[in-house]
Amino acid sequence: MSIVTLKDKQFKPYIKSEQIEAAVKKVAQQINADLKNEMPLFVAVLNGSFMFAADLMKQIEIPCEISFVKMASYHGTESTGKVNELIGLNQNIEGRTVVVIEDIVDTGNTIEKLTSMLKDKKVKSFKIATALFKPSVYKKDIKIDYVGIEIPNDFVVGYGLDYDGLGRNLKDILVIA
Ligand code: IMP
């Protein structure tokens, strides 16, 4: 794949789909081994994780469920400040082993909010699985249990990741040129 233009920016080839495939397989093998007695509930965070979630789930061989959620945040009253909400999780997840599926972990702000909401719902435990991880930017203490590929602090698109809504459909990952 050559240079791809998305709106005002150009992106060049970075990680080929074959390499992503191998990374997803590795993550799935770890989860299959670690959680074989847990009947985990996978919680895929939309929109970005849709491609990773689909590929990962095809490699998961243990009994499991999957739900798709969206994070929404809005300003509550002045005293409560910013309120975060999880949309789409309609079942009771108390006591469940949850595996969060993310497209990318960057600063970790999203993961921090999400895991605090999961704790409020009294899950038994949670693990984080992400296709991409930017360790040099990550600032939180929460363990990222399963990482597909570590990347430097570059802006990437493809494999579910977007630039202003575009590029999610690309099967390779591209980096800003
Ligand atoms: P965090 O909360 O800073 O960890 O960022 C997580 C979210 O930021 C991801 O779910 C993406 O939506 C977005 N994001 C972070 N880095 C990139 C990138 O390189 N390309 C596209 N989106 C990104």
Image (tube, rainbow, N blue to C red):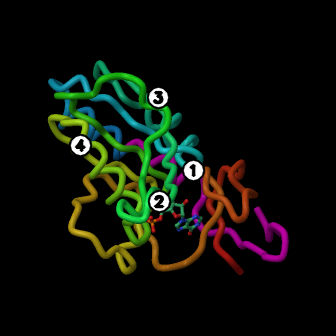
For the point 24% across and 23% down, which residue is it? 39
* Residue under numbered circle 3: 58
* Residue under numbered circle 2: 104
Three-letter amino acid code of the residue under disc 1:
Gly
| Residue 175 or residue 79, whichever sits in front | 79
For the point 71% across and 73% down, which residue is it? 12
Three-letter amino acid code of the residue under disc 4:
Asp
Of the two numbered discs 1 and 3 in the rendering, the one whose residue sits closer to the viewer: 1
Q: Residues within 10 Å of mark 3 (few under 14, many from 20)?
A: few
* Residue under numbered circle 1: 48
Above or below residue 35? Residue 169 is below
Q: Residues within 10 Å of mark 4 (few under 14, many from 20)?
A: few
For marks 4 and 3, the one nearer the N-term is 3
Q: Is residue 139 left or right of residue 173?
A: left
* Residue under numbered circle 4: 120
Is label 4 in a helix, a strand or a loop?
Answer: helix
